[in-house]
Image: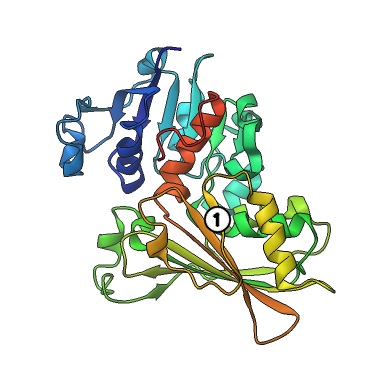
Amino acid sequence: MSKINILVAGSTGYIGVQLVKLLIKHPKVKIRYLCGNNSVGKLISFYDKSLKNKNLPKIVKYNKKYLKNVDVVFTALPNGEAQEISKNLLENNTLIDLAADFRLEKKSQYLKWYKQHHRAPKEIKNSIYALPEISGKNVKNFKIISCPGCYPTSILLPLVPLFKKKLIKTNNIIIDSKSGYSGGGRGIHKKYINKNLYDSLSVYGITSHRHNSEIEQMLKKYTKQKLFFTFTPHISPMFRGILSTIYVDLNKNVSLKKLQKTLINFHKENNFIKVLKINTLLSTNDVINTNNCIMSVCASKYKNKAIILCSIDNLIKGGAGQGIQNLNLKYNFPIKMGLN
């Protein structure tokens, strides 16, 4: 099989650059176009010196005429822009979106959470919310592959298996997540210029963070019970990494061992996920610069409760790496290809 030709739109943001760094190591792809706006004419190495002398094309402004020369379009763009690109996809094109344009199944929900009308509502039916360990090879059947947000990745990977087995109560889940500031994109430095970004911990988006919508949409697929959860995100004074701490109430006769065993069984064939021993304390340092996800089940001081920890790299497993996992699933490549 000849190489898959790739266009990366939004190539100069943190996730875009990370994607390029992974794609150049993937033996089955060729980057044909790198697209940007303010960066047109520059080399991608301007944004990351490690990409110097990698024989990459200069950055150009996106044009739909490029679609005839590529198989896959990766988008890491501001909300709404991948929707515009989706309208012009050719028969042989696949769109893998690393932003939020096709994460929600209802256009009304997109309007509610993103405060803008969906520009390609007819394309929603052609898209899949593609968390690889959950959606698996179903991505093959879709033209538009929507990669989950970084926070939901760290939350859904442990919670979906427990919801499926009805091991935890669904009406009182508390999720405390902390992310490196790269999750806010390059603009975060201007936004937090007076908030001592590099030395302080900041809470934001209480009740209003857009990832609430993804978490709710996915968890509701696995329960008929009322679902109530509180999700509070924080920006931490580190560049990358996420640690989510999830507090749950256990159903009757459910032990920590049962939670752990369920997670192990669910993820036993998922190469990038490791379920650790009970009461193992996690660090983002264990996963940064990898596509790995680690999780553990911990005891609470109350018998009928548990604390679940999950850590990922927000730019890889929570972004670019997830996109490449979905590329590999789409084209029947080994799941680890380009991600070792």
- Image position of 127 (left or right of 33): right
| 220 relative to 324, above or below | below
Q: Quadrant of residue 303?
A: bottom right
View extreme (bottom): residue:
301
Q: Residue 331's x, y, as percent?
A: 53, 23
- How many residues crowd around disc 1 within 10 Å: few (fewer than 14), some, or many (20 or more)? some
**Residue pointed to by mark 1:** 274
- Image position of 315 (left or right of 232): left
| 48 relative to 225, above or below | above
**Residue 97, visible in the rendered structure:** no
- Image position of 217 (left or right of 91): right
Q: Quadrant of residue 301?
A: bottom right
Question: Residue 180 or 228: which is nearer the viewer?
Answer: 180
| 304 relative to 13, above or below | below
Q: How is the image coloured?
A: rainbow
Q: Residue 337's x, y, as percent?
A: 44, 33
Identified at 49% across, 19% down, the residue is: 93
| 43 relative to 186, above or below | above
Q: Residue 112's x, y, as percent?
A: 60, 53
Identify which amino acid the numbered label 1 is placed on: Lys
Q: Quadrant of residue 17?
A: top left
Total of numbered circles in the picture?
A: 1
Question: Residue 291 or 190: which is nearer the viewer?
Answer: 291
Q: Secondary structure at mark 1?
A: strand
- Quadrant location of the C terminus in the rendered image: top left
Q: Residue 219's x, y, as percent?
A: 70, 55
**Residue 73, visible in the rendered structure:** yes
Identified at 17% across, 33% down, the residue is: 43
